[in-house]
């Protein structure tokens, strides 16, 4: 029999946060669970997030993309967090074989939801503070 606290923890979001540092050209992965992960729910691609909310120290991150549990990529020009089948000619989620080729592909909107599994981000400022805590 499960207790009430484990059921609540199950409903909270859990993300794999990939933090890229453009200065050193490296990236590190961090796992976010519970309230730290809930701070990202509702944010969209292009928004800046304070690292203190995520437990990463005094650093600013810009969300650049992500994928859901099935590997469906997020796309910046699709509204909301739902999956949609959009007609794509280039960009995230589709690379055409021939010039002018288009195809209908399954992609996810730009807003982070509980179904999101991986979030890609880039450091905007405060790069020296993020090096140590992200390793775990």
Image (cartoon, rainbow, N blue to C red):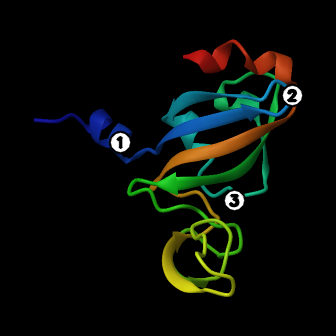
Query: What residue appears at the point 62 percent right and 63 percent down from the top-left corner?
Result: 111
Task: Give neighbour class at mark 3: few <14, some 14-19, many 20+ (Cα, 10 Å).
Answer: many
Q: Position of residue 70 (x, y in %)?
A: 38, 57
Choose between 133 and 43: the one closer to the eye: 133
Q: Residue furthest top?
A: 132
Q: Which mark is residue 23?
A: 2
Q: Name the secondary structure under disc 1.
A: helix
Q: Name the secondary structure under disc 2.
A: loop
Residue 130 sits in which quadrant?
top right
- Looking at marks 2 and 1 on the same chain, the residue that comes earlier in the sequence is marked by 1
Q: Residue furthest left?
A: 1
Query: What residue appears at the point 44 percent right and 56 percent down from the top-left corner?
Result: 71
Label 1 sits on residue:
8
Label 3 sits on residue:
44
Q: Residue furthest right?
A: 125
Choose between 36 and 23: the one closer to the eye: 23
- Looking at marks 3 and 1 on the same chain, the residue that comes earlier in the sequence is marked by 1
């Amino acid at each position: 029999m499960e207790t009430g606290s484990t059921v609540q923890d199950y409903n909270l979001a859990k993300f794999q946060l990939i933090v890229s540092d453009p200065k050193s050209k490296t990236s590190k992965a961090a796992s976010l669970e519970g309230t730290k992960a809930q701070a990202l729910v509702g944010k969209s691609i292009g928004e800046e997030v304070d690292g203190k909310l995520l437990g990463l120290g005094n650093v600013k991150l810009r969300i650049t993309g992500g994928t859901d549990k099935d590997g469906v990529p997020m796309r910046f020009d699709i509204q909301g967090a739902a999956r949609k089948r959009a007609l794509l000619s280039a960009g995230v989620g589709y690379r055409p074989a021939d010039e002018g080729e288009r195809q209908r592909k399954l992609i996810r909107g730009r807003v982070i939801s509980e179904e999101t599994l991986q979030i890609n981000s880039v450091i905007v400022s405060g790069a020296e503070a993020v090096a140590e805590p992200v390793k775990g």
